[in-house]
Amino acid sequence: MGALTVEGLRAGYGAGPDVLHDVTLDVRPGEVVALLGASGSGKSTLLRCVAGLEPLRAGRILLGGADAAALPVERRDVGLVFQDHALFPHRDVAGNVAFGPRMQGLAPADIDARVDHALRRVGLAALADRPVDALSGGEQQRVALARALAARPRLLLLDEPYGSLDRPLREGLASALPALVRDEGVGALLVTHDQQEALRAADRIAVLAGGTVRQFDVPERLWRDPADATVATFLGVGPLFPATVTDGTAHTAVGTFPVATAADGPARLLVPTAALHVDPHPDGPRLDATVVDVRFAGDAHRLEVRSGEHTFAVRTTTADALPAPGGTVTLGVDPRALRVLPADDGPRAGSQTGQRAEPRAGQ
Amino acid sequence: MTGTRGTRRRPRGRPLLLAAVPTAFLGLFFLWPLVRVLGRGLGVDATPLAPLWDVARDPRTHEVVAFTAGQAVASTVLTLAVGLPVAGVLARYRFRGRQVLEAATLVPFVLPTVVVGSAFVALLGRLAPVVDLRGTTWAILLAHVFFNVSVVVRTVGGLWRHLDEAPLLAARTLGAGPLRAFREVTLPRLRPAIMAASAVVFLFTFTSFGVVLILGGPGRSTIEVEIHRATAQLLDLRTAAALSVLQLLAVVATLGLYDRSRRHQAARPLARTATTARPVRGVRARLAVGGAVALLATVQGVPLLALGERALRVGDGWGLDHFRTLGRPTREAVLSVVPAEAVVNSLAIATVATLLALAVGTSAAVTAVSGGRVGRLMDGALMLPLGTSAVTLGLGLLLAFRTGPFAGRGAVLLVPVAQALVAVPFVVRTLLPVLRAIDRRLREAAATLGAPPRRVWREVDLPIVSRAGLVAAGFSFAVTIGEFGATIFVARASQPTIPVAIHRALGLPGEVNLGRAMALSVLLALITGTVVLLIDRIRVGQVGRF
């Protein structure tokens, strides 16, 4: 029984057009699902629908297997963590965290125990008596998380919870989320527009674009087999070249590449940057590019190169044979990584493949 | 299609039920009296428009209207001249005592008009040997500046303090001198606040009553004073009502003009930081701060000192004699009660009026933010009492309740009602922004944590609003205990409030009566001043943050 199941959800504001159409996904207990999408893709709307803060136009929301349609927001057992935390300004840290348990009518001793446990989970036990506006942004975020946890929800809803924080803090907090969620046995739906944050926190990622889930899968598969050009572009997998496929070969303006299984016809060829390496004499297919810039990136060099219409980055560790800006470079391509994607994906084109949620490999 | 209940939908009955309280109160005690004034003034029951026509033709009216408008314009210009430099210094510089000074500017604004009248009577009496301004227009103008400087300081200073300094610095790097940069960059951005402050000061001085009644002489009378004269001296309610209509028209026209000018103003970006004030460094900064402090001390401090001095001066010496006489009955029969009784009366009436104003104002404000058609209607309706002068309110109550349950002995109840009417807009204006500013997400957070709608109100809205409620209560009390314009129409001779007793004492001859008026004024000033300083502390400490 899943912590959350969303089926064919359609929603919008007032009399306006649908912000979400036909959204289907699920969250299992102990799992973090990231809802990844650009701003305006409908991520937050979906979260608000699940919380019961927005009405549905169609579809179903199941919480712990039961239809939530009849449940008002206060009886849904979901913990919502807002981007700017929405802490109660008139209560101290402990007072904020105790809110949920108090609403459940627990005995004072039990409330204290819950507060203590939740604050310890987020590492803020020492700050229990502080006023919330005396805390840093990161601490406020952790209080918001503790407040949601202390109510023992079956589902955590996190709406860009790290959005207002500095990068290192954001990454640290995102990395801590999976263990927390697993230990507490709750499911978590994390809204974010940041691929790195999704990768750090999520067991599965749903890519949302144009109000619909384009693809819902484990991160490895998303990057390896993006469902369409929109997903590939948003994830930043690599350049996409217009191509024509005939007899297992993709013909593009930058060369021909073997694509054994693809059907004939117009298409787009995805060349993942991870499949590229600097090699003057590659064994397999090759891609010639112009070097735009060369930068040292700590553990490797980062070459910004242009090929056809695309500018993209390639990493190389062969520091002794670095090309100069303005020169050309030959890139070897791992043919197994190449993907042929539909030539055109309209707003709906990806939805068929996108909503087939596949079970996580190895679980 | 499946529907889900959202928190945005509130229980249906609540806004209507809440709206009933202010609707009933304002309907009975504001709208109905106003209708009576309009009916009488427009001659609905006799020859239509005859009263208004008669008044409009009377040369005396022309004089009064010209004086009313003229002194209002002059007062506004003078107030801006004093207030703008002070606002700039308070906004731009950080120095010790700035907050105290800021709080002090607020005190005259909330001082009852009769106290200001008394203070200037004392001051002008003291100055008389050097320059005799008694009974001149200057007396009125100076008192108006004293009163309204804080409007300019607060309104303009509030914006000034939050103006981003970057554009000013950009203008300087582009070659503008300090004055030029001020004129080209700062002044245009302050315009909305200056316009707003001017409109408010103009309205206040245009409808000025107590100050003019006490300080003005023959030929120096505003429409408000004329309404009172027609009612109390000539017993001519028809003329009084017609003058009220005239007054309402003028006020509505002014508000309309102001609203139109405001609509053209676009929102301007403000600095992110709460303040751009800097410490006082250099001769010019010292001169500016010193000058502003001296100006404020002269305009606002000296009249108060004169009042205190006059209250304590006994013959050639000093003493508390004037205060002691407050407990003794007067020899003259005109002031029919022991002055100390007026103090007790006032405290009791102001308390009742404050509770009334809080009940009506809070339910009105909550209704106004609840949205929906009822809420929007209420929001608009609440602006009405703001545009109605206290004198018109008083006259209306007099006209509407000369017979019925509030006549005779029941008239005791009309005094707190009249005062509450004056205080309700203060309550609403204090609570509305706080209610509006409560982050919707706080309510949503409480709801997702398991709080049903009613509990959300109790746990989130109430605690946040209650502090503002304290401020509103304080303002109400300060306003009601000093209320004069409406009270003087409905207060019974046997139960005067402090302001009414002061006015009577000032009108009587003799050192004893003058001394009593001064002593009572000092008492009243101390009461309101204390309340306002307390409020200001709450504000700075907590409420200001929301």
Image (spheres, coloured by chain):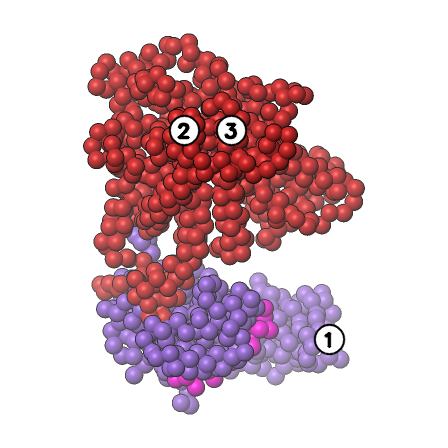
Q: Earlier in the sequence, mark 2 or mark 3?
A: 2
User: In the rendered structure, which segment of residues is drawn in magenta?
Assistant: A165-185
Q: Nearer the viewer, residue B37 or A48?
A: B37
Q: Looking at the picture, which amino acid does disc 3 mark?
A: Val
Q: CA distance from mark 3 to mark 1?
A: 103 Å
Q: Position of residue B283 (x, y in %)?
A: 79, 42
Q: Is residue A20 above or below residue B53?
A: below
Q: Is residue A181 magenta?
A: yes
Q: Which residue is mark 3?
A: B512
Q: Badge 3, how many Cα within 10 Å: few under 14, some, many 20+?
A: some
Chain A palette colour: purple
Q: Nearer the viewer, residue A333 or A299?
A: A299
Q: Looking at the picture, which amino acid does disc 1 mark?
A: Leu
Q: Which residue is mark 2?
A: B335
Q: Nearer the viewer, residue B201 or B474?
A: B474
Residue at 39%, 66% (x, y): give it: B445
Marker disc for residue A322: 1
